Amino acid sequence: MRNQFGELIASEIYCPKCKVAQPVRERLLLVLLDGELHEYVCVRCGASLGKRKVTGTHGKPGPMNPA
């Protein structure tokens, strides 16, 4: 089966504390050997609502190298 969505990034997730879907902020938790672990945090109350693992760079800018 073909991957239809590529990398899906959530903009809103249901928050059990707020009792409604809220916008989320993505926060970097860990840099791993095979990728990065990100956490979704509720913008309103700050609750952790989920995690996602990003493998490879997929067009993300890397750290800038000083000249």
Image: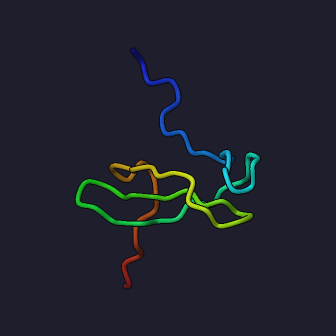
- In the image, 5 versus 26, the foreground residue is 26
Side of 39 relative to 21 (left or right)? left
Q: x, y (%) of residue 35?
A: 32, 55
Residue appearing at x 67%, y 45% in the figure: 14
Quadrant assignment for the C terminus: bottom left
Figure coloring: rainbow
Where is 58 relative to 40, above or below?
above
Q: x, y (%) of residue 58?
A: 41, 48
Residue situated furthest bottom in the rendering:
67
Residue appearing at x 47%, y 52% in the figure: 51
Side of 9 relative to 55 (left or right)? right
Instruction: Report which quarter residue 42 is drawn in.
Output: bottom right
Residue appearing at x 74%, y 64% in the figure: 44
Side of 45 relative to 38 (left or right)? right
Residue appearing at x 33%, y 50% in the figure: 56
- In the image, 4 versus 48, the foreground residue is 48
In this rendering, the count of numbered labels is 0
Q: x, y (%) of residue 59?
A: 45, 51
- In the image, 56 versus 41, the foreground residue is 41
Where is 1 relative to 17, above or below?
above
Where is 14 relative to 49, above or below?
above
- In the image, 53 versus 55, the foreground residue is 53
Residue situated furthest top in the rendering:
1
Instruction: Report which quarter residue 2 is drawn in.
Output: top left
Q: x, y (%) of residue 48?
A: 56, 60
Quadrant assignment for the N terminus: top left
